[in-house]
Image (cartoon, helix red, strand yellow):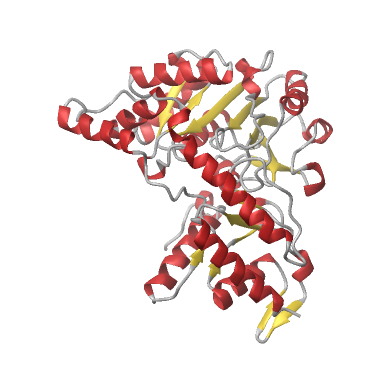
Amino acid sequence: MKRLSERVIGISESETLAVAARVRKLRECGLDIVDLSLGEPDFPTPEYICEAAKQAIDSRLYFSYPPVAGYLDLRRAIASKFNTQNNINYTHEQIVVSNGAKQAIVNVLLALLDPGDEVIVFSPHWVSYESLIRITGATPVFVKANAESGFKVSKEQLGKAVSRRTKLILFSSPGNPTGAVYSRDELEGIAEVVRSNEGITVISDEIYEFIEYSGSHASIASLPGMADRTVTVNGFSKLHAMTGWRVGYMGAPQWIADAATRIQGQMTSANSSISQRAAYEAISGGPDRSLYMVEEYRRRRDLVYEHLCRLPGIKTGLPQGAFYFFPDIKDYFGTRCNEYVINDAQGLCDYLLNHSGVAVIPGDPFGDKNCIRIAYTRPERQLEDGLNRIKKSLALLQ
């Protein structure tokens, strides 16, 4: 008898990866698809980072197993980055380099959670948070923010959600899918709730730290009393366009960093040696050498915003970070065009993909059934094309 574990049965496939796979199949059939679904930079990894990887290969010094937590010089560079750019005094011993930021989050969840524990998740949220929590046997508790609050959870909402079983609080800023950025004052409200409840740890997902347009990014671990209560997760995928290199990292209280290292040592061991050499070059050079990408994202954001604001039935704010829009599209529920009947966000996404060849993602897996996520990680010409196709298709719905 073939039977999967309850652990696997209880989780779903990542919606973003499922849509990406569907887009690939349609393109293989010769269809012209504008893909606004996947949050992956369309820039190549900067040449100076690639050159560091080439030099590491040519040196023949990095063909052995690296230390599980990462090379010492890379961990020292990450600790220095936290100190100078985030005002968090992690030592290199508190840094764990992992196979992407997702693994860093998984390491912490596995280290801290038992069945019956609860994790408060600020929602809308990244699609993988729920499944990753459920793998551990713990229960996600979603605290939902809306467009009126800028998709940001308040101190009061958080306080009401805390229970005796709360073990973790998990959120991202800048946020995926909304682009919301928590100010220092808003983070202080969250910190007040944490400080008044023993035994709660925060996971702050800051992978979009530098793709931020308001100039107000702050790390919750930098607030008084929070460094010992916070795991700060980051990586190289977004700012440095290194998604395929798979390098993430965490800064954490020592006891959590030690536990995460033990888990990683058994599951995957260290991150790729050559990827780590590339990451060392990226972080040693500072963020400035990659900020040209952020300026391009800002221009694309403004372009998409102008288009969306002109579309009837679409409600959106101006995201302050990341590279997504999360517009409300519920005014189209109940409409139709020929055989297409739009009952929900999934129906609208299917219609746009099949009718106009534009791929976007429904908001349900992110925690809001009335929204869709649009990624602007494509050149302006493709964005213009995709948005014009969306406009024409929406105009046919009655």
Q: Residue at x 66, y 47 (%)?
A: 178
Q: Residue at x 44, y 72 (%)?
A: 26
View extreme (bottom): residue: 338
> On the image, which quarter does residue 391 sit in?
bottom right
| Residue 73 versus residue 234 in the image, above or below | above
| Residue 15 versus residue 212 in the image, above or below | below
Name the spot of residue 246 as percent of width and height, x first.
39, 39
| Residue 97 versus residue 142 in the image, above or below | above
Q: Residue at x 63, y 37 (%)?
A: 213
Q: Residue at x 61, y 23 (%)?
A: 230
Q: Is 165 placed left or right of 304 in the picture?
A: right
Residue 370 seen in this snapshot: no
Is 301 or 41 nearer to us in this picture? Answer: 301
| Residue 172 versus residue 62 in the image, above or below | below
Please count the marks in the image.
0
Q: Is 278 placed left or right of 155 in the picture?
A: left
Q: Is 117 placed left or right of 295 in the picture?
A: right
Q: Is 84 placed left or right of 49 in the picture?
A: right
Name the spot of residue 29 as percent of width and height, x first.
39, 76
Name the spot of residue 54 as percent of width and height, x first.
22, 35
Is 137 or 93 nearer to us in this picture? Answer: 93
> On the image, which quarter does residue 218 sit in?
top right
Residue 164 seen in this snapshot: yes
Q: Quadrant of the C terminus?
A: bottom right
> On the image, which quarter does residue 282 sit in?
top left
Name the spot of residue 388 as percent of width and height, x first.
61, 69
